Structure formats: structure tokens, C-alpha cells
Amino acid sequence: MPEAISEFLPIYLLAAIGLHGGIEMRKTGFEEMLIPMLVAIGLSLLFTLNHFSDSKKTRKIQHL
């Protein structure tokens, strides 16, 4: 595969997925998206803090 195509293809795919998702979100009401957004934010915080805690315990990070 030529290098130009391998550089362009991921950008094109991300843009296409993002535009499609944006259009679908626009069709949906905010109330329908609120709970899934809050769950996603909560899980991302939970996983991040859990991973940070585990890595701090296992690697003995002192400066944080």
C-alpha cells in the first residue's frame, strides 16, 4: 500500500465515523443521550482512578 494512502485512510475513516456519529446524535434528543453520557463519564473516571491506584501500589510512585 502506498504511504500516501496509509496516511490518508485513518484520517478519512475517523472523519467519516465522527460525522456519522454527529448526525445520529443530532437526530436524538438530549434527554436520551444524558444518561449514557453520564455513565460513560463515570466509568472513565472510575477506570482511570482505579488504574492510577493500582499502578501507584505496584510501582511505588512517590512523587504523586
Image: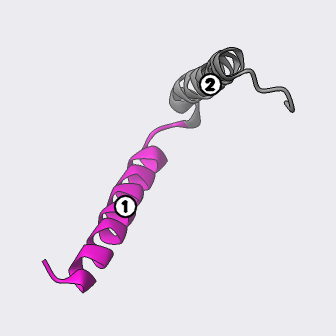
Q: Residue at x 46, y 45 (%)?
A: 25
> Residue tagged by mark 2?
38
Residue 60 is situated, as x and y percent measured from the top left of the image, at: 74, 21
The kind of residue on which mark 1 rests is Leu
Q: Residue at x 64, y 22 (%)?
A: 55
For label 1, the crowd category at 10 Å Cα-Cα, with few meaning under 14, some 14 to 19 and many 20 or more, is few
Residue 15 is situated, as x and y percent measured from the top left of the image, at: 38, 65
> Residue tagged by mark 1?
14
The kind of residue on which mark 2 rests is Leu
61, 16: nearer the viewer: 61
Mark 1 lies on a secondary structure that is: helix
Quadrant of res 43:
top right
Quadrant of res 56:
top right
**Is residue 56 part of the magenta span, yes or no?**
no
Dominant SS of magenta comes to helix
CA gap, disc 2 to disc 1? 24 Å
Residue 24 is situated, as x and y percent measured from the top left of the image, at: 38, 47
Which circle's residue, 2 or 1, is located before the other in the chain? 1
